[in-house]
Amino acid sequence: MYIILSQTPDKDGFQGQVALNISQIIGFKEVSYKDIGGNSQKDKSGYVGTYTEVLLNPSQVVLVADPISNILRKIKDSKVNQS
């Protein structure tokens, strides 16, 4: 079973999608964007920009724009739809 997530934008602003096999996902890590000095970057409203690292087996990390709560919801929905 696969879920589709949005990748983080590249340096040209392109933001593609990635399909991940949910049986290979072993964890998540939410990370803030950092500037060259190591400080968290904030948007115009003052919120820290974040992305999620999806940890896959075997030893692979995929960077996505979706927050962890959305990823978990998509996994739950895909399992419900499979039943």
Image: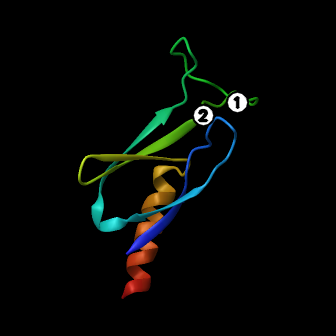
Mark number, residue 43 = 1
Q: Amino acid at mark 1?
A: Asp
Q: Residue at x 42, y 71 (%)?
A: 2
Q: Residue at x 46, y 68 (%)?
A: 3
Residue at the extreme front: 12
Residue 61 located left or right of residue 13: left
Q: Position of residue 16 (x, y in %)?
A: 61, 55
Front residue of 41/13: it is 13
The colour scheme applied to this rendered structure is rainbow
Q: Position of residue 81 (x, y in %)?
A: 44, 84
Front residue of 61/26: it is 61
Residue at the extreme right: 44
Q: Quadrant of the C terminus?
A: bottom left
The residue carrying mark 2 is: 49
Residue 78 located left or right of residue 42: left
Q: Residue at x 46, y 34 (%)?
A: 31
Q: Quadrant of the N terminus?
A: bottom left
* Label 2: element kind: loop
Q: Is residue 56 above or below residue 23?
A: above
Residue 23 located left or right of residue 51: left
Q: Decide which of tag 2 and tag 1 comes sooner along the chain.
A: 1
Q: CA distance from mark 2 to mark 1?
A: 6 Å
